[in-house]
């Protein structure tokens, strides 16, 4: 059982919902990424989703695009992100999932990338633009390395397609609650309950809902329909605002703590 499975098992036992936090690796620099990871762990985050910066982040809105740009400008590469994860592992066992575009894996070499991810202490990969049926021996390599392949389902995904996708996933399923790209929204989608109910007809994995969750109240709302919520752009926006501040980690971790408290204070079912 890898760290993701263990964390969701622990959450079930406590009758709590999980918090998945996304940040761009290397934004504003990799030492900050390490410190933020440790701060988020202390603040109550359950899974850290690390975006490996890429020049064409097509699934991302402007906030996360700019984070990727800052990551590239700080000299962040996949190899350096592996080193950062290994450094995090000296002090924390928070589950870590890479949010990555396939071009980076292909360029690095898929077998080598998965092997190095495992050795660094990564627990899962969410490859944004890799459909299960085009993944070649990806699933076999992931199984061999005991890493969780996390897949996406969108509001526009037909039910038969959902059934096909979820067969390939492990760890958790990421439900993208809105059409379009990542980004903060004024209100949450009103179809989340309907879609998560449909997904559960085909899937026993925990469902994490993301895209557009921007504040503790929205996090509490969405947690009623899922096993976890994912907050990315709102956290990344905090990093953009306070990236040059000496209390960056304290400020951003405080925001993450407010999200964790919102979804864990009381039982949602």
Image: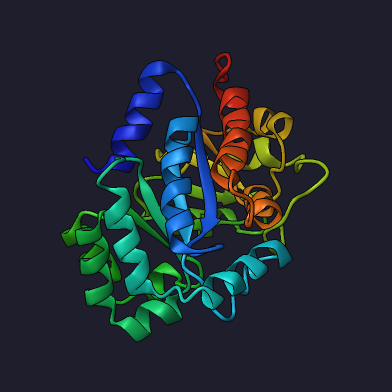
Res. 151 in view: no
Q: Residue at x 37, y 65 (%)?
A: 81
Q: Quadrant of the C terminus?
A: top right
Total number of numbered labels? 0
Q: Position of residue 90 (x, y in %)?
A: 25, 46
- Residue 124: image quadrant is bottom left
- Residue 260: image quadrant is top right
Q: Residue at x 44, y 32 (%)?
A: 42
Q: Position of residue 233 (x, y in %)?
A: 66, 53
* Left or right: residue 234 compared with residue 170: right
**Viewer-proximal residue among 13 and 90:** 90
In the picture as drawn, the residue positioned furthest to the top comes out as 266
Above/below status of 257 relative to 32: above
Q: Position of residue 159 (x, y in %)?
A: 57, 53
- Residue 216: image quadrant is top right
**Viewer-proximal residue among 37 and 184:** 37
In the picture as drawn, the residue positioned furthest to the bottom comes out as 107
Q: How is the image coloured?
A: rainbow
Q: Position of residue 70 (x, y in %)?
A: 59, 70
Q: Quadrant of the N terminus?
A: top left
Q: Residue at x 64, y 63 (%)?
A: 64
* Left or right: residue 48 compared with residue 67: left
Res. 210 in view: yes
In the picture as drawn, the residue positioned furthest to the front comes out as 246
In the picture as drawn, the residue positioned furthest to the right comes out as 186
Above/below status of 80 relative to 191: below
**Viewer-proximal residue among 101 and 163:** 101
Above/below status of 10 relative to 112: above
């Amino acid at each position: 059982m890898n760290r993701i499975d263990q964390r969701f098992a622990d959450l079930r036992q406590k009758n709590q919902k999980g918090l998945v936090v996304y940040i761009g690796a290397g934004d504003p620099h990799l030492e900050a990424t390490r410190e933020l990871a440790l701060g988020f762990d202390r603040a109550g985050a359950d899974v850290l989703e690390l975006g490996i910066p890429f020049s064409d982040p097509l699934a991302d809105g402007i906030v996360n695009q700019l984070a990727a740009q800052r990551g590239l400008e700080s000299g962040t590469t996949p190899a350096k992100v592996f080193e950062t994860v290994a450094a995090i592992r000296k002090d924390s066992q928070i589950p870590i999932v890479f949010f990555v575009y396939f071009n980076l894996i292909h360029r690095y070499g898929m077998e080598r990338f998965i092997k190095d991810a495992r050795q660094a202490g990564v627990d899962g990969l969410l490859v944004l633009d890799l459909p299960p049926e085009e993944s070649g021996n990806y699933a076999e390599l992931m199984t061999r390395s005991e890493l969780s392949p996390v897949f996406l389902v969108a509001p526009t995904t037909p039910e038969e397609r959902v059934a096909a996708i979820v067969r390939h996933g492990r760890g958790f399923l990421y439900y993208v609650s809105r059409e379009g790209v990542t980004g903060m929204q004024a209100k949450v989608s009103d179809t989340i309950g309907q879609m998560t109910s449909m997904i559960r007809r085909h899937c026993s994995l925990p469902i994490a809902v993301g895209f557009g969750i921007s504040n503790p109240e929205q996090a509490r709302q969405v947690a009623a329909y899922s096993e976890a919520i994912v907050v990315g752009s709102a956290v990344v926006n905090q990093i953009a605002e306070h990236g040059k501040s000496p209390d960056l980690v304290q400020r951003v971790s405080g925001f993450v703590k407010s999200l964790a408290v919102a979804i864990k204070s009381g039982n949602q079912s």
